[in-house]
Amino acid sequence: MSLENFIQRATSEWMKVKGPQSDIVFSSRVRIARNLTELPFPMMAGTSQGEKVVKTIEKAWKKIKKHQPILQSAELIRMENLTDLEKRVLVEKHLISPSLAEDSRHGAAIISHDESLSIMINEEDHLRIQVLYPGLQLEKAWELASSIDNLLEKELSFAFDDQVGYMTNCPTNVGTGIRASVMVHLPALAMTQQLNRLIPAIMQVGLAVRGIYGEGSEALGQLYQVSNQVTLGQSEEEIIENLIGVVLQMIEHEQSARTRLTSISIIQLEDRVYRSLGILAYSRIMDSKEAMKRLSDVRLGIDLGMIQDVGSNVMNELMVMIQPGFLQQYAGERLNPEERDIQRADLIRERLRMEKQTD
Amino acid sequence: MLCPECGKRPATIHYKKVVNGQKTEYHLCELCAQEKGEQMPGFDHGFSFHHLLSGLLNFEPITQMGNPQDDASHSPQVLRCPSCGLTYNQFSKIGRFGCSDCYSTFQQWLDPLMRKVHGNTKHNGKVPERARGKIRMRHDLEKLKEQLHRKIHEEAFEEAAQIRDQIRALQRQLETE
């Protein structure tokens, strides 16, 4: 497969469009958890019950899809029909969760053609409706997720209680069942050592800050995921407003840190950015940690206007494509970690060369 | 000191094990401790949010050393969800519900749990269309019952009979929904 074709397939349609505030906010995501009445949650479900959940949801989706173009274009994928590598690629694109890929029985996902909508079936809960948008667009993401929820609700009976709201497998999702999150790039705050103060402050207002691959992952490439923790007692709109309010403040802090950095140590910053670009353009072996760090530097250089001949979308693409699943898919074979590091360096060099040619 | 198991990493986990009165001291690094986890109570699951929950709930401490029958005998709640079969013991250990009926089975722990996790016990967000109808019907039902009492009290039996019919119709509707 040529690199161009591979990029076409590797990057979701939604990623190719620039969203609001996209120099700092890479993406917005809203996920809502729903369960069917009458059937036990996936954790307690027997084989026939797990299958029944998939069948019931598939039937409902087929009935409602004419009302919503995004559902019309979607496809239902069963985890048992995918290879480990294919599942890994879906995880790396954030279309399914690692636990759906690895642990689910009768796991499936309905994924829209542009990959902005994904409905996971038989993850922790019977349904997880997820919408991903570029930039800061949480309200829009919630609108779409909620409208899909409304359509599904016409065909399905969701477990709901006046007191606790939507009932979920884990008590941390009960009530609204909503998890709203944004992925932010905070290199200047990291360089100026301000994150150590900022992150605890954010946690104090009931939000969680994590590395990009969710729970327990470290922040690679200065990318952080900020999300709500509380799902009960507040309305969905309040939860989203609260999160947006905090994210806007983070953006402001990051911007002023960027301005300060360029005014007091522009030559050091330029050196760091161009050094990273040089390493990306010429290295032969690169592990993912270093790659993410270098890509983060270059992305900052692009956002600050230091580098003009590389598009910011190239950095977004590469951050997705240098992950192990993608690298192996591109190579068309299984690779051990050493081979992956070589493949990663090759892919980055090739992609940057392509960018130069199209100038 | 280095972990004697792998000889590479520092030993950070220290514990004593008593088997038949024989006391043995262990010093392991985290990784080796995890690998040995099968035989050691308390190390076997790694640490996650769900292990915090049993602490939050002041559940009985979970020991895997004791014999399960002993556990049941000094646990006052030998509860099991009639729908999915999740036991109180499992619920307290994993901190998750097995089905929507577990919420009523384990009702007595619900409020404190929700207050600790969310600082709140009452849902304040979206209500599904279906439930909206039900909530309204339940509300109407309560009102009609009040009216019925009033009419009977006023000895307006003809009107009372009409209201009784309305109540029956609503109850039937609620049951079939």
Image (cartoon, coloured by chain):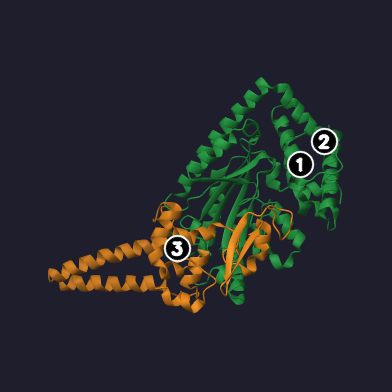
Which chain has been coloured green in this picture? A
Disc 3 is placed on an element classified as strand
**Which amino acid does the dot numbered 1 rest on?**
Glu
Mark nearer the N terminus (2 vs 3): 3
**Identity of the amino acid at label 3?**
Phe
Mark 2 is on which residue type?
Ile
Q: Residue at x 61, y 28 (%)?
A: A257
Can you see residue A65?
Answer: no
Do tag 3 and tag 1 residues touch (Cβ < 8 Å)? no
Dot 2: few (<14), some (14–19), or many (≥20) neighbours within 10 Å?
A: some
Callouts 2 and 1 close, C-beta under 8 Å: yes
Taking A355 as reference, is B44 left or right?
left
Mark pair 2, 3: CA separation: 54 Å
Residue B163 place in picture, x, y as percent: 24, 70
Task: Work out whether mark 3 precedes mark 1 in sequence or the reverse, and give the earlier one.
Answer: 3
Residue marked by disc 3? A160
Query: From the viewer's perspective, is A36 left or right of B44?
Result: left
Q: Which quadrant would the C terminus of chain B be assigned to in this image?
A: bottom left
